[in-house]
Amino acid sequence: MTGRLLAVAPLAFELTWDPFMRGFLAVVVGVIVLCGSTYLLLGTNVGSRLGFLIAFAGLMGWMTIMGLQWWVYGIGLVGDVPTWKPIEIVAGDDEADTRASQLRDVHDLTTWEEVPEGDTRRGEIQAAADEALVSEESSAAPFEETGDYQALDVYERGGKDGIAKRLPGPHPAHYAVVQVQEVVEVVTLTDPEEECPAGAQCIEFGTTPPRPQVDESALVHSVVMVRDLGNRRYPPALITIGSAILFGVTCSALHRRDKASDAARAGAPTASA
């Protein structure tokens, strides 16, 4: 127990007033004022036990309705959003050389759908590929910066189309491939007598850098990714189901109490006139 306390002790020094402590106290004060005032009002009228059951049932009913709205629209306290997960990075002599991929479908990209420039899907796919190509956490990243290469083509295959993607049920595997190639290095010459390195594009100091040009002799890197659907609606579903269960249990307790109270009143002797 002491070891665990010592392990989490450094976290206490990282807590700041804004936003952590301020947000935490705002939630605590809100719960005490709203829920506490309702319970206090009911407790002074119907008693502490019955007032707690009524207040708790109302809170769970409100949580059920709120959680249901979060669940349907995918808002509020959500889980992981859908993202593209890199599987592998394949290097080939040209765009058609993808035989080193572990997925057989990647060997022939002519059957895949090419995502055109300007499509919103292309931007999301290419952004995920950039993270895999220049990731500092992975030793397999072939580049150091996003400016060292240029995207050639983006392909997509699988998944659901149209309104079918919004319907529950099994989802086919959804893959994407981004092909990039290294660009010619641009060297700025500060000395007029300095020689331009072989294979590089040299410019004089102070001139406008040229547009990146693809190095045709460089390898073509193909980033193979799979679509991770995430669990965006999982937390709202748990909130809705859990709140509904507690709401039902509390209402059942209130109903059984009413039945017991009615039975006690019916069996009590009436006062004689």
Image: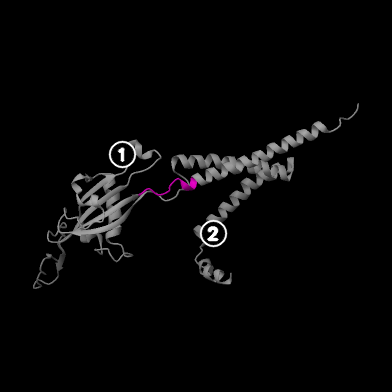
- Nearest to the observer: residue 105 or residue 210: 105
Q: Residue at x 51, y 63 (%)?
A: 16
Q: Residue at x 79, y 35 (%)?
A: 264
- Against 267, residue 14 (above or below) is below
10 Å crowding of disc 1: few (<14), some (14-19), many (20+) = few
Q: Amino acid at mark 1?
A: Asp
List x then y, in percent, for residue 120: 28, 45
- The verdict on residue 64 being magenta is no
* Secondary structure of the residue carrying numbered label 1: loop
Q: Residue at x 28, y 58 (%)?
A: 88
Q: Which residue is mark 2?
A: 21
* For residue 45, side relative to residue 228 (left or right): right
- Against 267, residue 132 (above or below) is below
Q: Quadrant of residue 85?
A: bottom left
What span is colored magenta in the figure?
Answer: 228-236
Q: Which residue is mark 1?
A: 161
